[in-house]
Image (cartoon, coloured by chain):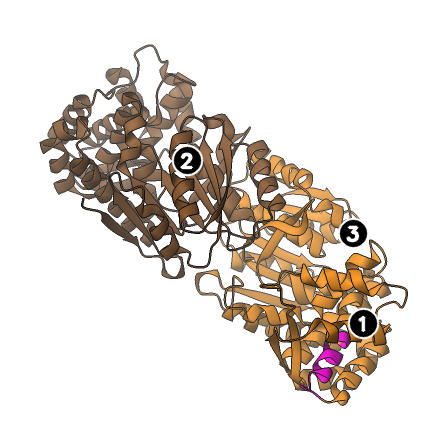
Chain colours: A brown, B orange
Amino acid sequence: MASLRVPVNLGPRSYSIAISSGDADGLAAFARQAVPKSNRALVVVDAAIPQHADLVERNLQAAGWQTRRVTIPSGEASKSTAELSRLWDVLADWPADRKTLVVAVGGGVIGDLAGFAAATYARGLPLLMVPTTLLSMVDSSVGGKTGINHPSGKNLIGAFHQPAAVWIDTAFLDTLPEREFLSGLAEVIKYGVILDADFFAYLEAHADAIRRRDADAIRRIVARSCELKAVVVEQDEREETGLRAILNYGHTFAHVFETIGGYGAWLHGEAVAAGMVCASRLAEKQGLISAELTERQRRLLARFDLPIAPKSEWPIDPMIAGMYRDKKTELGRLRFILPTKLGHVELRDDVPETAAREILQTAS
Amino acid sequence: MASLRVPVNLGPRSYSIAISSGDADGLAAFARQAVPKSNRALVVVDAAIPQHADLVERNLQAAGWQTRRVTIPSGEASKSTAELSRLWDVLADWPADRKTLVVAVGGGVIGDLAGFAAATYARGLPLLMVPTTLLSMVDSSVGGKTGINHPSGKNLIGAFHQPAAVWIDTAFLDTLPEREFLSGLAEVIKYGVILDADFFAYLEAHADAIRRRDADAIRRIVARSCELKAVVVEQDEREETGLRAILNYGHTFAHVFETIGGYGAWLHGEAVAAGMVCASRLAEKQGLISAELTERQRRLLARFDLPIAPKSEWPIDPMIAGMYRDKKTELGRLRFILPTKLGHVELRDDVPETAAREILQTAS
């Protein structure tokens, strides 16, 4: 079975992403290569998927690691100082040292939380990301963002801490609910729109195989998504040049949809799907692209049953107000990532509020 | 009045250390150069020295900064998750963004705590170190170590986060108690022993001027200490190659003296002073140096009323046991930084326990 490797080139913080399907035994050898001297591993796992942690622990133990496990309740609420302290306590009790590997088995919540514990214990422990959701495979496990939430904002407390390696086994997706799987595809499609027209065409041509989770197709789209994200991260590791902002295509809208919908309304990827269509329509309105590009996105998203417009009952004013609180906002001007052609986007701060308002009014 | 600049060359994380005497007005211009776009500054200050924060805030405000202040109780106990959360809350309430400058006004406790808050808010805020103790001027404010304590160990929770700039005004030392001032000199002397024989000779020749806190002499020894620390940090920013360990000369002994003496017995620099003499005697015993080098250190330390031996009532066995818990220990072997000549030290793991024991027995 073909196993793919994607390098992330960040000088002394470079690492490799392995993408395979059903190759559980390969994990320990891959980890050993990334952290040759490590002999202890703290496995942090989402409470919903203990079987994946069993597999990971068994493999690490067979390769000579001592392991401990911490199980984290599923859901965003676990990105808290309480869960962070719990991880610190387990590490301190062991005690962990700088060679202790932290292994994050789960989706974005687990990766962010375990990653932040790794970033802040003994000024930095090596981190192995083992993403088990499509969204975390193609997005949060690559790029070094770690953190927890603060009552005042999501991800407000955090650090950049690149993993030592990322192990992606698409077999983990077998346990992923259909809606979460489809939601992850929104971010995959995003990479096509912002960076790679050929990849977008590939997604159009293979939508059926992807939807039935054909292993070859999944490995391919996960690998290409990681590659594209890596290229962006390599050029703007710490979000300083602004380049990394292009990854936020559709997200100015998506964030307000998530906020106004409230917990449980939409998954992140669902909000991003509708957000991309809105951003694309905004680009049309600004004369940047033709209607056809929006239509292609809309059609592709619809093949995965993803929403292509905000809900009609959501009031416009609070959504507009929310956009002004977006972290991309500067000097009171709305900022959007807008496509100028398939495979290319730009950060624009010349979009009038009226245009954004009109998109929301006619979309819903 | 001569103002000195010491560059710390760390690629994209490079910064400058300014050393002046009584140049309070220079701070804001220096900070502006380091963080051109910043317009908010959170001033974190030790409760014992509000007047220094007044000065800093006034200057930042005159230069267009909005400022807020958080006062931290003096002492090691403030390196806690409680104080850290308090800083996060103030930043989140404001709200701070990535251009908000965190300004640490105080000694090592303030620098470590405020630095860690800066490292972990919004994945990293710019940090201006304004050390007000001699120890923090020559040691903790340079090099990027930040963190808090955990019940299981000092500095167990932390991150490397290089400051954007370090502003040292030796006039801040005017409020420093004599004993703390002298304690800081132990680390200054350490730099001479480990890296610079000429500097050691300068300290011998100017001990009187230093002791009476002559501004020119103080600026010179602070600048040289920072320069020497910068050279080490530049070559081993994240304590990976082992080079940075040479900064721990005298510290294997010092840490057990601090532990066995308990809170309030010895200041850190006092423990380091006695620790250096013990390490030097150990080097003699191993045939690495002649007795004269130990004698020169002992004489110089004594001119600043620094201890040159552990207290006689301290029992040997727990001190030996403590050395095995030192973070430098590997595979159950004691490791010491030992001089081989004035201005050069090496990490040695071939010292038998009996030798260390004998030093402690005959020293006290």
Q: Which amino acid does label 2 sit on?
A: Asp
User: Circle 2 is placed at which residue position?
Assistant: A54
Identify the residue shown where x is 48% and y is 53%: A39
Q: Which of marks 3 and 2 is in front?
A: 2
Q: Calculate the distance from the C-alpha at mark 3 to the C-alpha at mark 2.
A: 54 Å
Mark 3 belongs to chain:
B
User: Circle 3 is placed at which residue position?
Assistant: B49
Quarter of the image for the C terminus of chain B: give it. Answer: bottom right
Mark 2 belongs to chain:
A
Percent position of residue B315, x then y: 85, 63
Q: Is mark 3 on a helix, strand or loop?
A: loop
In the picture, the disc for residue B148 is none
Percent position of residue B87, x then y: 64, 40
Q: What element carries label 2?
A: helix
Image quadrant assignment for residue A14: bottom left
Is label 3 on the same chain as label 2? Answer: no
Q: Does the magenta stretch include residue B284?
A: yes
Q: Do the residues labelled 3 and 2 touch (CB within 8 Å)?
A: no
The stretch of residues the image draws in magenta is B277-289
- The outermost residue toward the top is A313
User: Circle 1 is placed at which residue position?
Assistant: B360
Q: Nearer the viewer, mark 2 or mark 1?
A: 2
